[in-house]
Image (cartoon, rainbow, N blue to C red):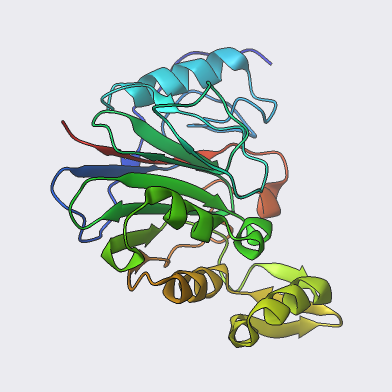
Amino acid sequence: MICSMNCAMPEFFVPDWPAPANVRAMQTLRTGGCSVKPWDSFNLGDHVGDDAGCVAANREALRRFLPGEPFWLRQVHGIAAVDVNFCPILPEADAAFSRQPGRVCAVMTADCLPVLFCDRAGSVVAAAHAGWRGLLAGVLEETIRSMAVPAADLLAWLGPAIGPRAFEVGDEVRAAFVARDPEAAEAFAPHSSGKWLADIYLLARQGLCAAGVSEISGGTRCTACEKVAFFSYRRDGVTGRMASLIWLEA
């Protein structure tokens, strides 16, 4: 497969949340860019089989809207959160945080839940990648701990993820969440024999609230249902990745 390099303008939106003025964030869409099917077209993932030249061109197009190169992670569905200012390039982690202006925290998703954080004073920001494994293991709680400010001072934005009418899981997933928190049962609806539809947004909200975060925005988009706007691994298998990015303005 050969990349045409005929890149369209990348498309993204700015999260609607009450963040301080010096906190900047953006969520990319699948549209724009130059990748061809099945990664069409603004794929930012360099690990999904897409042409390396297309990914590089897409990332360069994204870079024009940012104060610096995004700090990409090697995401592994774990809980590690790293400081982008004191960490090797491409660390194995699922969250990143920064207290320095101009340093861009980023996570990539295609059904998993991206969560952006900042504090009310605009002194620290973070981005976390939360699939069900990460949520269960505590990636959001570890991100909050790493930010080193009171949880009550934090704001969280839930980016596009697979919605509650599309996210099928087995009995073992539901049992694991309910064992950790009985209230998690509210996030699972019976679907078929041994299967449930999970509300990853509700699970995240429950975890954030339990950790002390009360200001939570977003959580209304479905990557699997909105085919034009979003990549979805569950829907398509081989597909691209969007990015959720946040940074402090100088």
The x and y percentages for residue 154 are 30, 61
Q: Is residue 8 visible?
A: no
The x and y percentages for residue 247 are 29, 38
Residue 189: image quadrant is bottom right
The x and y percentages for residue 105 are 40, 36
132 up-or-down from 104: above or below = below
The x and y percentages for residue 42 are 47, 32
- Say which of 174 and 79 sits in front: 79
The quadrant of the rendering that contains the N terminus is top right
- Say which of 235 and 115 sits in front: 115
Which residue appears at 44% of the width and 49% of the height? 146
- Say which of 62 and 82 sits in front: 82
Which residue appears at 43% of the width and 46% of the height? 127
Q: Is residue 249 visible?
A: yes
Q: Is residue 193 left or right of residue 21?
A: right
Which residue appears at 72% of the width and 69% of the height? 168
126 up-or-down from 160: above or below = above
Q: Is residue 174 left or right of residue 70?
A: right
From this viewpoint, which residue is outermost toward the right? 193
Residue 26: image quadrant is top left
Q: Is residue 239 left or right of residue 9?
A: right
- Say which of 26 and 34 sits in front: 26
The quadrant of the rendering that contains the C terminus is top left
Which residue appears at 23% of the width and 31% of the height? 101
